[in-house]
Amino acid sequence: MPDRVVITGTGLFTPPFSISNEELVASLTVAVEEWNAERAAQIAEGTVAARPVPDAEFIERASGIKSRYVMEKSGVLDPQRLRPHLPTRSEDELGLQAEMALPAIHEALAQAGRRADEVDCVIVGCSNLQRAYPAVAIEIQHALGAGGWAYDMNVACSSATFSMQAGVDALLNGSADCVVVVHPEITSGHNNFAARDHHFIFGDACTAVVLERAEDAIAGEQWEVLRGRLLTKFSNSIRNDFGFLNPSEDTERDPAELVFRQRGQQVFKEVCPMVVGHINEQLQALSLEASQVRRFWLHQANLKMNQLIAKGVLGRVPDEDEAPVILDRYANTSSAGSVIAFHLCRDGMVAGDIGVICSFGAGYSIGSQVIRRL
């Protein structure tokens, strides 16, 4: 039985539109001022609290985010809409997530030196899927011209590391020979752009990773997966109640329940120590010291969270080379974030260098892959 799996390629699709903090704040300010004006009497009576206007400087200070990419910009910035304007596609048209996935996959396959018809497993791991069935992964498999089998999975922001582990397992047990895991995140579709506390958090992107057995790999650049580890612990602190049962429920849902929501401070306090412990246990299992890790590609959720986690592992504040950040321009792209960081920020690493790809998010869910440059 094979005992070594390698990453042989990665790919990234970046959407065509970018929105700055200033643009986002200007849009929400108009919406807030209109909302307050419509309720001026109640606000004066004290029966309704006025909504505060957003602040672009606060966004960067609190999160490290300066801008984000989106699949559609005009609807997000329309104060009367505050959500993407995505035309409905017919059954005969390629789905939007599949459309995002193909460029990322082709880039990853080019790095791996593989053709699409050599792929025999496609796993889509992302926080939101555009439909229940047929699986987006099967649509991508068909459009790609791949063989084998495909399926979708959702573990929120940890979907990339969880799907990578599923790919590793498929290769080790012999059920696949060339695995593509892909993460088409349209987080703008599940974000509440009317909520001041988190209207700025998310952006859209898609990443892809090719996994193969080491004995089969032909790529010039290979990364051995030394160990993967997954952890889940139930929490309601990050939640989205959108689902197929909504129309059957006896009472009408608050629209804010059907998009992303979180208790930010609670998430920060609970998740950071969990991730530090998770990474430390990973390294201990491999008899590695934190000082032996060349780079940490962490989930790109919040700059302060990433700094605190890296400090907890290293015992000191990391520099940007040790824990690279891409959320300043991509924002939180859910599961894609840690893979974007790996894709864009692995220059300078040489044979023998060790890195950790780590994600964390709703569930709670935490996943990590310790990898070594060959």
Image (cartoon, grey):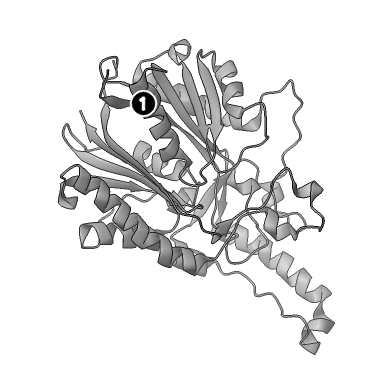
Q: Left or right: where does residue 151 sit relative to residue 366?
A: right
Would you say 156 lies left or right of 210 here?
Answer: right
Q: Position of residue 371 (x, y in %)?
A: 26, 36
Above or below, comparing residue 109 to residue 77 in the picture: above
Q: Amino acid at mark 1?
A: Gly
Left or right: 11 with respect to 213?
Answer: right
Q: Is residue 310 above or below residue 342?
A: below
Residue 357 vs residue 342, the one in the foreground? 357
Q: Position of residue 344 (x, y in %)?
A: 36, 39
Residue ID for mark 1: 9
Q: Quadrant of the C terminus?
A: top left
Q: Is 289 drawn above or below residue 49 in the view shown?
A: above
Residue 321 seen in render: no
- At 39% across and 34% down in the image, what residue appears? 165
Q: Position of residue 297 (x, y in %)?
A: 33, 46
Other-residue count near label 1 (Cα within 10 Å), few / some / many at <14 / 14–19 / ≥20:
many
Residue drawn at the location 74% of the way across and 46% of the way down: 245
